[in-house]
Amino acid sequence: MPDPVVTPEAILKDQVRMTLDDHFTFHCGPNQDCFTGCCHDVSIVLTPYDILRLKKALRVDSTEFLEKHTLPIFGAQQKFPLTILRMDPETKKCPFVTAQGCQVYADRPWACRMYPLGVAKPKNPTPTDQPFYFVLHEDLCHGHGQGKTRTVREWIAEQGIEEYEMMGASFQELALHDFWNREPALTPQQAEMFYMACYDLDRFRRFVFESRFLELFEIDEARVEALRSDDEELLEFGLLWLRFSLFGEKTMKIRREVVEARKQAPSQGAATVAPGSAV
Ligand code: SF4
Ligand code: SF4
């Protein structure tokens, strides 16, 4: 199954553009002769919330999950690090597919939920720009034209996609930020910060609580407590920290005493706290 977020408009010139209220007819299930055929040799980009859900479902630490089940991608084509689901190197199958179906169905990634729908979003959207949808037709998938006819909106509700979109909104804002048009590339340290805060949440938590992070930033007690155990809260917080550190936005507040100390000894460096920095 291809990545259903398609950005270059050129790819879409032959696709029928659909709104949330347009209909399509599709059926997927164990009675299809193609059942699980789409869970083989696919490139699935994982969002931060996908990783959060999968590592919780598998009851493993994010670091372990990333090492076992993902491949990082950060080349000349990407402005920031991405992760894809690692297929079995020999069989090319998704690590979670069984003869009975998806082993992590309740927590399957956003891309798996969307399929066969794709969504396209303008690269530099204006406030009135809406995403549009299209149906991906691939020879391997025999579900088209079968079963129920429903609207795109109904599919999104049935597949539990709303929650993923809600949790993914802050990441999407970060990913579409104008910063990426202005800056040529992240430094290795910035890329490491990005990867940790977005994907390796348990390591980010250790970083927050085991470095001087909390001595430098003013964060209210209730939030600090939530960050200890609430992954969703930690993910949102990590994205604010990235906006502060990478984009220079005032999403975090440095403690007054730290600012004063820095004024006395400016050679101590910037207030950005990053993994590997002297914190
Ligand atoms: S996560 Fe589940 S639905 Fe997605 S490719 Fe793997 S087995 Fe298939
Ligand atoms: S119908 Fe399509 S989506 Fe469903 S199992 Fe077959 S190939 Fe996969």
Image: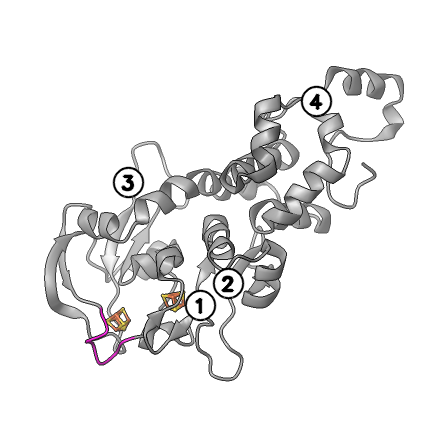
**Ligand 2 rendered quadrant:** bottom left
Residue 45, image x, y percentages: 46, 60
Mark 2 / mark 3, whichever is N-terminal: 2
Residue behind label 3 places its C-beta within 8 angstroms of ligand 2 = no
1 or 3: mark nearer the eye: 1
2 or 3: mark nearer the eye: 2
Q: What element carries label 3?
A: loop
Mark 1 / mark 3, whichever is N-terminal: 1
Separation of disc 1 and disc 2 at Cα? 7 Å
Q: Give the range drawn in magenta.
A: 29-35
Q: Are marks 1 and 2 in contact (CB under 8 Å)?
A: yes
- Using the rendered image of the protein, determine whether residue 185 is visible from the camera's viewpoint: no
Separation of disc 2 and disc 3 at Cα? 26 Å
Quadrant in which residue 239 is drawn: top right
Write the residue at 71% across / 29% down.
214
Separation of disc 2 and disc 4 at Cα? 35 Å
Separation of disc 3 and disc 4 at Cα? 37 Å
What scheme was used to colour the molecule? one colour
Residue behind label 1 places its C-beta within 8 angstroms of ligand 1 = no
Q: Are marks 3 and 4 in contact (CB under 8 Å)?
A: no
Q: Name the residue under label 1.
A: 43
Of residue 97 and residue 154, the one placed in the foreground of this image is 97
Q: Mark 2 points at which residue?
A: 84
Q: Is mark 1 on a helix, strand or loop?
A: loop
Write the residue at 83% across / 21% down.
262
Q: Callout 1, which amino acid?
A: Ser
- Residue 33 among magenta residues: yes
In the drawing, what numbered circle is on residue 254?
Answer: 4
Q: Callout 4, which amino acid?
A: Ile
In the drawing, what numbered circle is on residue 275?
Answer: none
In screen coordinates, is 124 left or right of 51? left
Q: How many residues crowd around disc 1 within 10 Å: few (fewer than 14), some, or many (20 or more)?
A: some
